[in-house]
Image: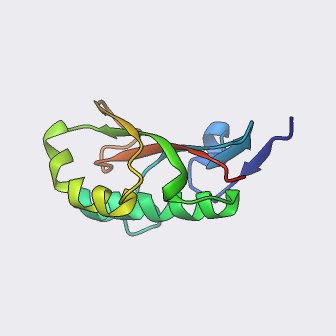
């Protein structure tokens, strides 16, 4: 089996020892992803959008997209923030909603309000 690793240059990848995504066994496994860049939005919806943009880039590099996502896990320090993200998530996944789980938990840095992890089936 061939394994391909996709790095995004995120600040924690080298520090912790992981990559943005791993393509293996017909799937793209995208690591938990928070808002990216030096100017992290303060609001949960802005952070959600930033994380989804990074995930979309990783999925594209893997050869798939949001329509191929079969599983998503949302991690939030405050579960009450989650409903604000629902319209954006519904728009993102559209007619291809994945199986989903939302967990309330601490994240790597208190500035983050959402982290998103996905698994997508590669086309073909």
Measuring 46% from the left and 61% from the top, which residue is drawn there? 36
Q: Nearer the viewer, residue 46 or 10?
A: 46
Measuring 56% from the left and 60% from the top, which residue is drawn there? 65
Residue 54 in percent (x, y) is at 51, 61
Left or right placement of residue 33 versus residue 84 in this view: right
Q: Is residue 89 above or below residue 79?
A: below
Q: Residue furthest left?
A: 80
Residue 64 in percent (x, y) is at 62, 58
Name the colour scheme.
Answer: rainbow
Q: Residue furthest bottom?
A: 39
Measuring 58% from the left and 56% from the top, which residue is drawn there? 10
Question: Count the marks: how many?
Answer: 0
Q: Is residue 53 above or below residue 114?
A: below
Quarter of the image with the N terminus is top right
Residue 69 in percent (x, y) is at 51, 48
Q: Is residue 1 above or below residue 65?
A: above
Left or right placement of residue 97 versus residue 21 in this view: left
In which quarter of the view is residue 26 placed?
Answer: top right
Residue 15 in percent (x, y) is at 63, 43
Q: Nearer the viewer, residue 74 or 106?
A: 74
In which quarter of the view is residue 103 placed?
Answer: top left
């Amino acid at each position: 089996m061939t394994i391909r690793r996709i790095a995004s240059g995120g600040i924690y990848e080298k520090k912790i020892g992981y990559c943005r995504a791993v393509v293996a066994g017909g799937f793209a496994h995208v690591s938990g992803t928070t808002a990216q860049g030096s100017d992290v939005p303060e609001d949960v919806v802005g952070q959600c959008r930033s994380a989804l943009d990074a995930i979309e880039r990783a999925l594209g590099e893997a050869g798939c997209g949001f329509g191929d996502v079969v599983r998503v896990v949302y991690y939030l320090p405050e579960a009450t923030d989650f409903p604000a993200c629902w319209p954006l998530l519904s728009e993102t996944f559209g007619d291809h909603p994945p199986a989903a789980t939302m967990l309330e938990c601490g994240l790597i840095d208190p500035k983050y309000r959402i982290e998103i992890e996905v698994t997508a089936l590669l086309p073909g």
